[in-house]
Each structure stands twice: as C-alpha cells, then as structure tokens.
Amino acid sequence: MTVDVICQIERTILPYECDWKENLLLSQALGMMMLASRKQQQQLQNPNLIYEKGYTWIVIQHEIEIQRMPKVDEEVIIETQAISYNKFFTYREYRILSKEREELFKCITTFAMLDMKARKIVSIDEEVVLEYPLSIGKEMRKATRIPKKDFSDATTGEYKIRINDIDANLHVNNARYFDFAFSELGMEFIEDHQLKQVVIKYEKEVLPESTISCSTLWEENTLESQERRQTYHLISQDGNRCANIQMKWEEIV
C-alpha cells in the first residue's frame, strides 16, 4: 500500500459536533485531525509497529491559527502531513479546508513517544518515525512559548474527570482540555468573540477518576480600533501543572 504524503479525509459537519452558534467545536476539530493522521498510520507498512514496541504517540503541544470555524452541514476537507522529527519530538501539520479549498484552520502539533508501561517519554524510535513520508526530515524546531502568568487571583473552577474523557492512552484526551477552558469563559464571552489563535502545552497527564482545576485570566488590548482579548488558562491537579493554554480572540462586531 502507498502512503499518502498528504493524507486527507472529507467530512460533513454534523449538528452534535457544533456549539449553539452552529460553529464546529474546537475539541471536535482536534478529533477530526487525529482521524486524518490515524488514516495515514493505517497506510504504513507496519501500522502497529509503535504498539509492538510498547510505545504510543502523545501530544505535547498544539499551535492553532483560525480564519473561521466550519459551520453545521458544511462540507470540509481535513489534510495532514508529517513534517519532521528530532531526538525527542515529531511534528505534524493539519489543515481544515472548505470544499473550495479555502483554509479555515491550521495546526502544527508536536508529538512525543510514551512508554506505555513506564508512563514516561522516551527518545524517538527512528524505525517507527521513518515509516512516514516526512516533508522535511530531521530538524530542530522552536516551539511557541506561552508567557508565564500569575494565576493566584484567577477565577477557578473544578471538574471531575468522566469516563468519556479518557482515551486509549488511559489518560484525559488532549481535546477535552478545551472544554474545561470554554466552560470557564462562559456563553456571553464566547457569543461576542471569535477565537483566532490557540497555543496549548501539555505538561502532565491527567489520569482517570481525577479532579482538576481550571484557572482563567483575561487580558485586553485595542489594536487598529478592533478589540482583541487574550485568555490564559491553567489546568492543574493537586497543585501540579497539567496544561497551559493561551487563546487570542477578536470581538464580533
């Protein structure tokens, strides 16, 4: 079987994948991304090699740019390609396109290899990664850094992890963290703002039957007469940092 350098799937956005404004949920967009890369993995000569070695892929960071989120009943194309790797990380690009191939959504994702038994990150196994058609190959890539923030005065909510939050890696699915953050922002804020950029860095996995805290800060600035806001979110458990999120928003006028 030939492995597609750029692997794509076509989808129609369904009502249950959207919010009350009929926009695709960010968590659902990430789920579609993972389906596209899974499709490419299934084309490999040995798609189960990583699991036979006792490893799995985990997400370390997403860097997302949004022109607009797809709408309910819209036909879209989800594309992905493996970009490069180094000793500890691999990098993959995802795009969501309209039927006319307008780019709606772009994401660069950093992956690491997790030893499933030891629950520890290990060096990238080249035998596994070189099965993929890489657009660049081996490289060092500088990740976008989220500014450090003091969350001592932040608004904070607590969430009990549900069974359906857990994925095949036996920890909270990386897409679920956005659901916690959006719950803290509230419907009024999301009604009046459009999400434009997101960076999320995962620092510590959240395991089943945990309770996490989501702390939120708002920052505001005016640029060229258009109101822009940034929100920062810290997902933590028992004082341990699990994920950091930075979101940039534009006010809907």
Image (tube, rainbow, N blue to C red):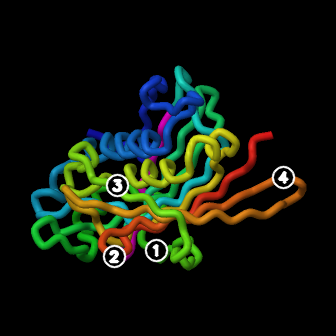
State which tag comes first along the sequence, 2 or 3: 3
Q: Quadrant of residue 40?
A: top left
Q: In the rendered structure, which amino acid carries the disc numbered 1?
A: Glu
Which mark is nearer the camera, 4 or 2?
Answer: 2
Question: Which portion, as a residue range, is magenta?
Answer: 77-88
Q: In the rendered structure, which amino acid carries the disc numbered 4?
A: Gln
Which mark is nearer the camera, 2 or 1?
Answer: 2
Magenta stretch: includes residue 102:
no
**Residue for badge 1:** 139
| Residue at screen point 27% across, 63% down | 206
Q: Quick one: quadrant of the C terminus? A: top right
**Residue for badge 4:** 226
Residue lying farthest to the right in this orientation: 225
Cα separation, mark 4 vs mark 2, equals 37 Å
Which mark is nearer the camera, 4 or 3?
Answer: 3
Tag 3 secondary structure: strand
**Residue for badge 3:** 159
Which mark is nearer the camera, 1 or 4?
Answer: 4
State which tag comes first along the sequence, 4 or 2: 4
Which mark is nearer the camera, 2 or 3?
Answer: 3
Q: Which mark is residue 240?
A: 2
